[in-house]
Amino acid sequence: MGRTLLLIGICACGLGHGWGAEPPATPTATAPAAVPAAVGGYAFTVGTEQVYAYSLKQSVAWSSAGDELTYTSTLTWKFILAVVEAAPERAVLEATILRVQATHDGPGSRRLVDSAAKDERDGRDDPLLGHLLALYGSVLTVVVIPATGAVSEVRGGDAIVARINKQSPATLPGDAPPLDAAARAAFSSEALGRIWSQLLALPSEQPGRVPLGPPLGGEIERVWQGSAFTLRLPAGVERLSANLMGDPTPVAAVLTELTGAGSTSVKDGLPGAGKGELGFLLTFQALTQPVVQRHRLQWELTPLLPPR
């Protein structure tokens, strides 16, 4: 559960973090050779709607004590974005999730959930991915500054947490549902705001700070050139530290070799097509055994229908 909820928390920016299994080879992300003109702000109009698909793929090549494994997870949301309020200084958007699909593949693991599957074959009973179906039909309210794409608030996460807890209730009276804590962390306004801030981010003349969600801490930089960007560690920083597990068996990790790139666009005043990728190396000790993970993430936002 924790691994997949963290995958949700990656979004369009980058460091999502499925630690126990997932991406691949050495990241080779570079900025596009041809750089389009800079993107202006959004021009939201009340009543406008646009259907999108957002897809995320995370792979992890895992090496320890001579063993090498690769796991890949994917997540796709199909959603409709509607403008419900619009002013130069503030806009309110509603995102209704129309379909959720997720997979997890690797040695000894082949998992799939799909909210569109019939006859309860959607994968709701899967212990790793089944909780993601709670996103289907959910509505998120996003408050954004049109000129910059900065998100100040996201509402609707509490309803998702309630759905997850209903799917996986407490086994004993008085106990908290088993997924409650992880769900609250993944779908808090802060966590969702981090996702949507990166999804709606617009170019700026100065490097932008991208906060990394748990279990990582700190920030990376996004540097714009027109509508294209690169992701990097801040100047003078060669590594980041993370606590993957706390007591009684703490696990500390070091992140290095971070590279990433992508692009964004605005079409008809709304978010247009965008994509990106990110790679990094993670090293740590697990039960005194050295572990090396090479992560790679790829994401893409695709408008599916003309705005209406």
Image: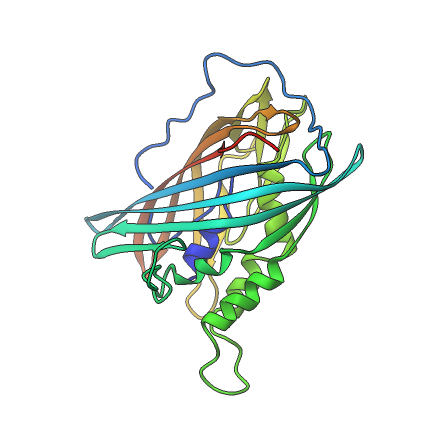
The quarter of the rendered structure image containing the N terminus is bottom left
In the drawing, does residue 198 fall left or right of residue 20?
right
In the drawing, does residue 81 fall left or right of residue 171?
right
- Residue 118 x/y as whole percent: 34, 58
* Above or below: residue 5 compared with residue 125: above
The quarter of the rendered structure image containing the C terminus is top right
- Please state which of residues 268 and 6 is positioned toward the viewer in this rendering: 268
Q: Residue at x 62, y 63 (%)?
A: 158
- Residue 291 x/y as whole percent: 31, 50
- Residue 83 x/y as whole percent: 68, 40
Quadrant of the rendered image containing residue 209? top right
- Please state which of residues 263 and 292 is positioned toward the viewer in this rendering: 263
- Please state which of residues 67 and 114 is positioned toward the viewer in this rendering: 114
Does residue 235 appear in the picture of this structure?
no
Farthest residue, direction bottom: 173
- Please state which of residues 1 and 240 is positioned toward the viewer in this rendering: 1
In the drawing, does residue 274 fall left or right of residue 308?
left
Q: Residue at x 31, y 39 (%)?
A: 24
